[in-house]
Image: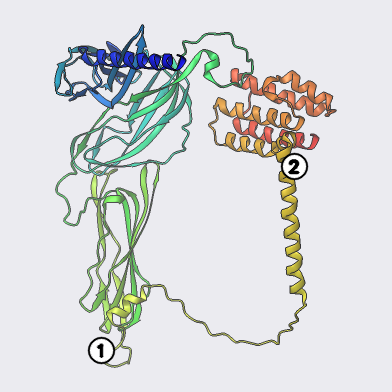
Amino acid sequence: MRKIGNMISHKQIALFILLSLASISFAQPKVTATIDARQVLVQESFTWKVEVEGSEEMPQIRLPNIEKVALLSGPMQSSNYTYVNGKMSSKKTLSYTFAAMEPGSVTIPAVDVYLGRKKYRTKPLKLTIVAARNAQGNPAAAGQSVYLRALPSKTTIYVGEPISVRYKLFTKVGVYNYQVDKLPDAVGFWAEEIPQSSQPRLVSEVIDGVRYNTAVLKTVLYYPTRSGDLVIDPLNTELEIEVKSNQRGNRRFNDPFFNDPFFSGKRKANKKFVSNPLTIHVMSLPDPRPANFSGAVGNFKIQAGLDTNAVFANDAVGLSIKLTGSGNFKSLKLPEPELPEAIDVFKPERTENVKIRNMKHNGTKKSTYLLVPRTPGAISIDPIEFTYFDLNSKKYVTRSSGKLDLTVYDAEGTLPVVTSGYSREEVELMQEDIRYIKAADTHFVKAQTSPLGLGFWSWHLIGVLAIALVYGMEMRSNQLQDNVELRRRANAVKLARKRLQKAEKLAEDSEELRALLHQCITGFIGARLNVAENSMDTAEFTALLEERGISEELITKNKEFLEGLVMDRFAPSAVQRTASEWISYSRELLQELRKAL
């Protein structure tokens, strides 16, 4: 009877599930479209969702063209099943994230939603985008706690003239991480990102009477390649920021370095932000342009020289052309020399050393030619000229290297010899590295050998010492594995140094820096004395050190250090000590504690 009862129970459950699924499949699907905000600020993001209830099919839509907004991400797909009062229901969702770009009224039109072969239609939705004003009079983030701005160095430039654009973050809340997938699209420009530290430095600024923490996330150099009003698209970034938490409760931890925002009634959330687009007016270079102008813009100097002024016929001589200065190095080419017919010239070797300094490209470009004069006599190489547009004087400037003279001698002292000497193939091989064999006097000495000499016993002694070292390390490892207290004590110095190294890489005003230094000292004391340092305050640490017989001077120094870190975090103006001074103080205190404990 028990076995039959179990079979009936299982059948009933299976039948109930089938009926529930059947009710879902025969129910009429419900399709709705929603947005998470009816009014947003310029540069703020919002989410548009299409939800389908009562269908196992994932909805398919064609995204409409919506004015005054830009698509940030999507579609994101999700499925949800619920079971309430014996009834099962399902929900399929497609979501898109947009950024508001221009102020005004926006209508998200009705869209067709396809569920298999059936078509449904949503209702249109209206959205209002509100512009705010900042100190520069641009649409910004009045009332917002976080926003992103693109700040150009200029808005009117010439073709080939660089501009720098700083993508700057303004925030009144904690920002823990940021991610930029790619640089903005900029049709008509070539761009290069200026390298910077992985962790941007926060600086406090007052904007319209409101204090913000600001940080430059990216700095990019843009060089326009054509004239007109060119647009640099907005930069998209995802930030992990601090938001209010819905959880409430009594805080049981009083450690000021407990840095999790959960314990302050806040939590972390990922949100997308977008900067403002930029319109740059690019002017054409003035006419008339010199015949030898190749598009160089900036400030340059050209030099040319021969590695020797006298050579025998059919011998090789090097000609180097070097361009130095600042400007649009990436798009320019060095001029080529005009040589007499009596000189064979080979493909040049090109080198480049260009770096970004003072928000522009500076450096050198060099071409080295291998020349082989075939006819004796005096040869003159015309000056090598280079023309560029000078941004300071707004004029075309031509630089010249000066004339180069070369004297070619007959190898036999008579008539020119053109059938001997190097061939073209042999000269090409001269450009490769050749290592010459140098003859030297060799003196042989009779070797004193013995099967049981010093070398024999030295190698055996080294082998015995190596075996002993490995055996000792294995014994030490076994002791550490069996004894948690010993292992923790042995790793105390290593962990403290690791925290110090991590603190050295943080910004000057980083709260995490003070927290790491606090953990460095308290963690070392806890590991050496085998106590749980996370549950102890400064007074308990002081009492613990007194019980261990530590000197009063060191106890006082440790107490002042811990209390000073707390004060520096919550009242920075009360402690006149920089981050480097804190790190140096921590390293000194760690050495003294290491000797005492």
Q: Residues within 10 Å of mark 2 (few under 14, many from 20)?
A: few
Residue at the spot 29% in from the left edge and 89% down from the top edge: 420
Q: Nearer the viewer, residue 478 or 542?
A: 478
Residue 67 vertical placement versus 88 (above, below)? below
Quote the CA–CA distance across marks 1 and 2. Answer: 83 Å
Residue 290, horizontal then vertical, whole percent: 17, 53
Is 122 placed left or right of 368 in the picture?
Answer: left
Residue 369, horizontal then vertical, whole percent: 31, 69
Dot 1 or dot 2, earlier in sequence? 1
Position of the C terminus, as image quadrant, is top right
For the residue labelled by badge 1, is the local secondary structure a helix, a strand or a loop?
loop
Q: Nearer the viewer, residue 571 or 377?
A: 571
Residue 82 vertical placement versus 307 (above, below)? above
Q: Which residue is mark 2?
A: 479
Residue 315 vertical placement versus 22 (above, below)? below
Q: Amino acid at mark 1?
A: Thr
**Residue 154 - label:** none
Q: Nearer the viewer, residue 354 or 167?
A: 167
Q: Which residue is mark 1?
A: 419
The quarter of the picture where residue 368 lies is bottom left
Position of the N terminus, as image quadrant, is top left
Residue 143, horizontal then vertical, whole percent: 37, 12
Q: Residues within 10 Å of mark 1 (few under 14, many from 20)?
A: few
The answer to whether residue 59 shows anywhere in this view is yes
Q: Amino acid at mark 2?
A: Gln
Residue at the spot 45% in from the left edge and 28% down from the top edge: 177
Residue at the extreme top of the image, as rendered: 85
Residue at the extreme front of the image, as rendered: 1
Q: Nearer the viewer, residue 218 or 319?
A: 218
For the residue labelled by badge 2, is the local secondary structure a helix, a strand or a loop?
helix
Residue 107, horizontal then vertical, whole percent: 18, 14
The answer to whether residue 490 shows anywhere in this view is no
